[in-house]
Every structure is written in C-alpha cells, then in structure tokens.
C-alpha cells in the first residue's frame, strides 16, 4: 500500500459519488487516471486491505435497534481454534480477539451481534455459548444505550 | 417499507460492487432497471439514512494505529466526558453501554505514538483510567450482513 492507495481510501471514505462514472470523479479529484483508481482498488481488495466494496447499511436505521457487544473469557489455547468459528456465524458482524486487562477485564473474545430486540440478541448469544461449550469461562452482553459518535475511518491528511 | 429494488440494493449489494467505469449501469443490468433508477434509489436510501454510504470497507489495523478504549465514568460525569471524547477527530466510534465500563470508543491515529498520546491526554484530562484493548486478531470474514428481508417473488415492473 503506497501513498496513492492511501489517497484513494481517504477520498472515498465518505463513499463513492452517486454519479454515472464515480471512479472518473475520484480520479479527477486526485489527478489520476480512472483505470488507475479501478486497478488500485481491485489490488487492495485482492490483498485484503479492502474487505469489500458495496452498500454499507445503517443497521440502526433499518430496525436493528439492539446492538450487543458479547464478550467472552476463553482460554488462550482454545481461542485460536474457536475464534474463527464464532466469526463465521452469520449473525456475528465483527469478531475480534483482544488482550485481557486484569484484574478488571478478563474477556478476550469480542463478538458483535445485532438484533431487532434484546431477545434476538440473547438467542444469538446463546448459540455462541453452545459453540464455545466448556471453553466459555464466562461472558456478558454489553448493549449500546446511545450512539454518541459514529463516523467512517478518519485518516489525517 | 422498502421497495423490492431497495431490498435488493440493501441486501445483495453489500459486496461485489462493480469495479467498472460505470458500476451503477452494471448493477442496473442485473436488477433489470435503468442506471438512473439505481442511482436514484441509492440516493433515496442515503437520504433516509438506511445506508451510510456506498464504498469500501477497509480492514481494521491496516492503516495507522487503532484501539478499542473503555472507561468506567461516574454517572454524573458521563455527559461531559462523552462529549469531549467524541470531540477528538481520532475518535470515530463512541458508544454508551449498559455496564460498569459505560463508555466505549475506537481511536484511530496515524501511528502508535499518536495513538498513545490521545489515550494519555484522555486519561489526564478526565482523571480516569482508560482501558485500551487493541485488536490482536480479526476472525470475521465480513461478507456483509444479511438483513433477512422476507423472501418475495421478483417485483413486477410497472
């Protein structure tokens, strides 16, 4: 990834323009050729820097009002095997391993689940618990009660 | 409620957006409508805030340095602390959550030094510990999110 790639990400982080030739518009803004923007985005997609390109739904506005961050205490030697399985569940939008912060925080696996209600979220979380089985040493669901700020990725210019 | 076209756009186009000089025209061909109709529908969804954008979702941690930070803020100070945490450009998500750790935010900075600096400033200014839980490994494939619209027959064209 070079500085031109960074500029493309930066120029499109608020979204691609809704015009007939969006890559041309981005290219013009950056002083690049349109094919160059397309080739570079394809390359970033192939290498995994870009996960996907498409419509980014606003879950909350679409009625998925219950946003539960489920956090799990899983032994370190189990999390390597089980983390990817949790991440594959269709209702898990994000799944990360993070460090514990002892003594006040002993959870090392985070799985974000969205539902139309807390009951939905709870039933999804119980499926995660089933999958983890005895490797689940404890878990909690932290519901968001307010979205205080949500913006796309910001890169310093 | 959403039209059939809107449902398709919301659910089926979260990935594989065409890397083609005229991507909306390519989508239109598959949807059996015109390019202008695709653009109009996306504009409408954006105005309704049903979508936040059409664009790339970048893998976390590939650019700059970031972390998930949490604080246990006493209730009477939450409004204040939340407001000035959100004011940092480096803070891109900030949620109040139903837990002793009631403020959760993502900080993204140009590099590790800049990130640590933001963490230190937030800790100093608030006089509260800031727990930093940076990503160790990402496990989801992120193919998008199935919105589970009820299955319907393709909408007849008017």
Image (spheres, grey):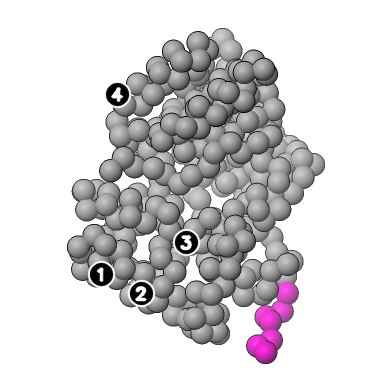
Reading the chain from its start, which is encountered first: label 3 or label 4?
Answer: 3
Relative horizontal placement of residue B130, taking residue A131 as reference (left or right): left
Residue for badge 1: A34
Residue for badge 3: B54
From mark 1 to mark 4, how far is it between C-alphas? 35 Å
Residue for badge 2: A21
Q: Which label number is shown at residue B113?
A: 4
- Can residue B51 be found in the magenta stretch? no
In percent of width and height, residue A47 lies at: 32, 52
* Most frequent secondary structure within the magenta stretch: loop
In percent of width and height, residue B26 lies at: 44, 78
Which subunit holds the residue at mark 3?
B
Relative horizontal placement of residue A85, taking residue B158 as reference (left or right): left
**B13 relative to B38, above or below:** above
Q: Nearer the viewer, residue B84 or A139?
A: B84
Q: Which residues are magenta?
A: B152-158
């Amino acid at each position: 990834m070079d500085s031109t790639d960074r500029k493309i990400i930066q120029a499109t982080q608020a979204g691609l323009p809704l015009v007939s030739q969006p890559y041309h518009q981005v290219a013009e803004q950056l002083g690049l050729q349109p094919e160059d923007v397309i080739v570079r985005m394809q390359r970033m997609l192939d290498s995994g820097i870009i996960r996907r390109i498409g419509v980014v739904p606003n879950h909350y506005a679409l009625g998925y009002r219950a946003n539960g961050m489920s956090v799990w205490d899983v032994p370190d030697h189990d999390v390597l095997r089980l983390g990817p399985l949790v991440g594959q569940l269709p209702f898990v939008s994000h799944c990360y391993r993070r460090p514990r912060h002892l003594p006040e925080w002993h959870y090392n696996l985070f799985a974000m689940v969205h539902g139309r209600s807390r009951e939905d979220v709870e039933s999804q979380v119980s499926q995660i618990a089933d999958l983890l089985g005895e490797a689940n040493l404890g878990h909690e669901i932290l519901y968001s009660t307010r979205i205080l700020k949500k913006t796309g990725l910001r890169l310093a210019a | 409620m959403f039209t059939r076209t809107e449902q398709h756009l919301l659910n089926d186009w979260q990935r594989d957006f065409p890397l083609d000089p005229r991507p909306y025209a390519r989508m239109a061909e598959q949807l059996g409508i015109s390019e202008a109709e695709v653009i109009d529908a996306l504009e409408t969804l954006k105005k309704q805030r049903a979508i936040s954008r059409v664009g790339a979702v970048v893998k976390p941690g590939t650019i700059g340095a970031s972390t998930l930070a949490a604080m246990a803020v006493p209730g009477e100070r939450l409004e204040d602390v939340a407001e000035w945490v959100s004011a940092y450009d480096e803070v891109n998500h900030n949620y109040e959550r139903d837990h002793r750790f009631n403020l959760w935010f993502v900080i993204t900075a140009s590099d590790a030094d800049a990130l640590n600096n933001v963490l230190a400033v937030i800790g100093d200014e608030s006089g509260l510990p800031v727990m930093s839980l940076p990503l160790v490994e990402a496990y989801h494939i992120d193919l998008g999110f199935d919105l589970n619209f009820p299955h319907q027959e393709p909408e007849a064209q008017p």
